[in-house]
Image (cartoon, rainbow, N blue to C red):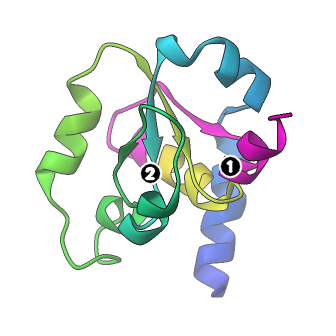
Amino acid sequence: MSNDMQALLARARAEVEEIDVETLAGETHSFLIVDVRETEEFAAGRIENAINVPLSTLIPGLGPTNDAADLAALTDDSRRICVYCQSGGRSAIAAYTLSQVGISDAVSLAGGILAWLDRRP
């Protein structure tokens, strides 16, 4: 990971609210659940009812496109947003990025989908 990305991750983790899997599991109806992993990762498995908006589409210059429709999908819902990734790093950056564009009600799932899957019996 580059120094710039490490600095961004550190800033994001310092400023973004994280919730644990138990909180999300008990309140899934209260959240628009957004998987910020890449499309292939999302296709391999996801949290039920999650939508896919890859992190690469949220950060200008990172992905091949920065479609306004991606952000529109996140603002057309009245629920709070819970973003998740594989283990929690990309989702912290995504929640921070969303806060920078005026979407202040986004939280990051601590531990990502790995923590979500670990909570199951």
Q: Between 61 and 112, which is closer to the camera in this rendering?
A: 112
Q: Which quadrant is home to the C terminus?
A: top right
Indicate the amino acid at tag 1: Gly
Residue 25 position within the rendered picture, expressed as x and y whole percent measured from the top left: 67, 21
- Separation of marks 1 and 2 at Cα, in angstroms: 17 Å
| Residue 56 numbered tag | none
Magenta part of the protein: which range? 97-121
Q: Residue at x 49, y 34 (%)?
A: 48
Label 1: which secondary element: helix
Mark found first going from the N terminus, 1 or 2: 2
Circle 1 packing at 10 Å, graded few (<14), some (14-19), many (20+), is many
Q: Is residue 71 left or right of residue 117?
A: left
Please tell me which residue lies in front, 29 or 48. 48
Q: Is residue 75 magenta?
A: no
Taking the image as shown, residue 28 lies to the left or right of residue 13, namely left
Residue holding disc 2: 97
Q: Which residue is mark 1?
A: 112
Give the percent coordinates (x, y) of residue 113. 66, 49
Q: Is residue 20 visible?
A: no
The answer to whether 70 is drawn above or below residue 6 in the figure is: above
* Mark toward the viewer: 1 or 2: 1
Residue kind at label 2, given as amino acid type: Thr
Query: Where does the N terminus fall, quadrant-wise?
Result: bottom right
Residue 30 lies, with reference to residue 24, above or below; the image says above
